[in-house]
Amino acid sequence: MSTPAIQWYPGHIAKAEQQLSRHLDKVDLVIEVRDARIPLATGHPHLDRWLKGKQHLLVINRRDMVTPAAREAWEAWFKGRGQRTVWCDAKAGTGVKQVQQAAIRAGDQLNERRRNRGMRPRPVRALTLGFPNVGKSALINRLVKQKVVASARRAGVTRTLRWVRLGQDLDLLDAPGVLPPRLDDQQAALHLALCDDIGQAAYDGELVAQAFLQLLIDLQQQQASGVAIPVLESRYGIPVQGETADPPYWLEAAAQRHTSGDTARMAQRLLDDFRKSALGSIALELPE
């Protein structure tokens, strides 16, 4: 099922990328944050350009929102490509200490090189980078142990760059979510829309909800995805078989039952339920 092209590149993101380029020379470590439900779609195609030999720490946030089997599969996939991952749930704080320890270890390596060159040690300067709404600000607040930056589960909350001091070992630069100017991979763009990692103005909610239903039907054969069609059927009282296996038909039937026939409201309800894990822990992407 196809949806109209999804594109979103608001002005504050373009401005943030310009600011980012001016700060990169000051940064020793890039802490890249991705969404556990869609770790490929939340990987920025320009990442290598920003790294330029800097140390890279890949943090996969929202570990609570996917199955352990999905997490293990992705850990093995990234390890096979030489990339170590740290998994966390920034909202609850799970795994945040491991993120901090990994960043401090990177700082120890930096300061060892500085000492060897006769230079004094200093805090490591780390940039937190990632798509909108993947949890960068929530992670920083957990690391600092207080709310120092605005955080919410919607895209576009952080709009300016800001340095935050974490003890004597680490300075963090919180950057707004960054997106490529054009989303060429429309399947990835759909995943971003489903996970609320781009603005709602970028897509038609009803069509995205229909595409989500089809995706669930396709993923149910992969146990690691966590898709449980009976959970969907039980929650809304509409079977996913026969005629109602057709996403537009299912959405209309569910709307008749729950939202007085308003399919737009029903679509939003379905997406909201997924985003708060009311349909279970679901990984929309799994490694090949």
Image (tube, grey):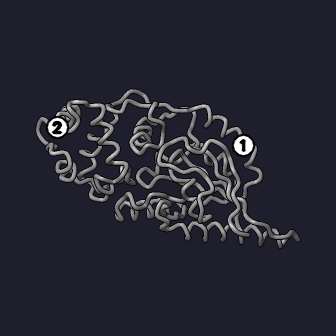
Q: Where 74 falls versus 9 (above or below)?
A: below
Q: Residues within 10 Å of mark 2 (few under 14, many from 20)?
A: some
The amino acid type of the residue labelled 2 equals Arg
Q: Secondary structure at mark 2?
A: helix
- Mark 1 or 2: in front is 2
Side of 196 relative to 224 (left or right): right
Q: Residues within 10 Å of mark 1 (few under 14, many from 20)?
A: few
Quarter of the N terminus within the rendering: top left
Q: Which residue carries the number 2 mark?
A: 257
> Residue 251 versus residue 5: which sits nearer the camera?
251
Q: At which x and y percent is residue 37? A: 40, 52
Circle 1/circle 2 CB separation < 8 Å: no
- Seen at 67% across and 60% down, the residue is 55
Q: At which x and y percent is residue 184? A: 49, 33
> Residue 113 versus residue 6: which sits nearer the camera?
6
Q: Looking at the image, which residue sits at the far right?
A: 118
